[in-house]
Image (cartoon, helix red, strand yellow):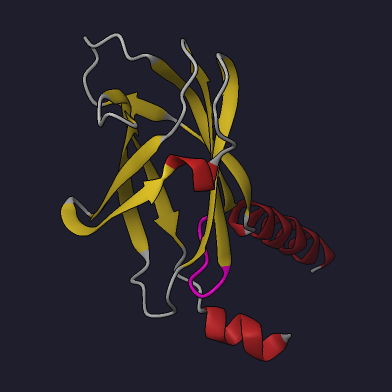
Amino acid sequence: MMRYTAITLILLSLLLFILSPSAHATDIRYCDKKTDYEVKVHGVEISPDPVARGQPATFSIAASAGNAISGGKLDLDVAYFGWHVHSETRDLCTETSCPVSTGDFVISHSQVLPIFTPPGSYTLKMKILDANKRQLSCVAFDFSIGFGSSMAANFLM
């Protein structure tokens, strides 16, 4: 009996570790692998991962610029299981410090997703445009919205 209790505790601990939200580096894909983009995106960190509905989520994109960028836009498209569900345009300078100097920089965006956002797999496509609407980079990455109810989490707090 004692042996089964220990095994059960180990399995539960492992399950909680795997399911616990944390920051996670995410793989990125360039929209066009043949294009030599001026802005190179090195990775994306999403916190928490998976994203929790009704709670703040932060997307931090590590990149480097070949030339200084005085300003521009981020065009964002979101797909849910392959279906387009959301588009928005953001001012680059509200997501990072402008002007962006040559070299490394981070684009960081925090947002609370509505409680009614369906859980599951999403893909975000992000185009970085300069002030003249010239495309500097285009990447896509996947992220998940958790199946757990944030209403239950709020109730427990």
Tell me which residue sits at (63%, 81%) in the image.
153
Vertical relation: 67 (above or below) 133: above
Magenta-drawn stretch, dominant element (helix, strand or loop): loop
Q: Nearer the viewer, residue 123 or 156?
A: 123
Q: Nearer the viewer, residue 74 or 13?
A: 74
In the picture provided, is 118 more to the left or to the right than 101? Answer: left
In the picture provided, is 83 more to the left or to the right than 133? Answer: left
Residue 2 lies, in percent from the top left, at 84, 66
In the picture provided, is 26 more to the left or to the right than 103? Answer: left
User: In the displayed image of the protein, which residue is found farthest to the left?
Assistant: 83
Tell me which residue sits at (33%, 71%) in the image.
118
Residue 29 lies, in percent from the top left, at 33, 26
Residue 73 image-quadrant placement: top left
Magenta stretch bounds: 49-55
Q: Nearer the viewer, residue 148 or 125?
A: 125
Residue 130 image-quadrant placement: top left
The N terminus lies in quadrant: bottom right
Vertical relation: 153 (above or below) 122: below
**How many numbered discs sit on the rendered protein?**
0
Residue 105 lies, in percent from the top left, at 59, 26
Tell me which residue sits at (52%, 18%) in the image.
64
Vertical relation: 49 (above or below) 119: above
Q: Nearer the viewer, residue 144 or 87?
A: 87
The C terminus lies in quadrant: bottom right
Q: Is residue 52 magenta?
A: yes
User: In the displayed image of the protein, which residue is found farthest to the bottom?
Assistant: 155
Tell me which residue sits at (46%, 12%) in the image.
67
Residue 32 lies, in percent from the top left, at 21, 19
Vertical relation: 23 (above or below) 148: above
Q: Is residue 152 magenta?
A: no
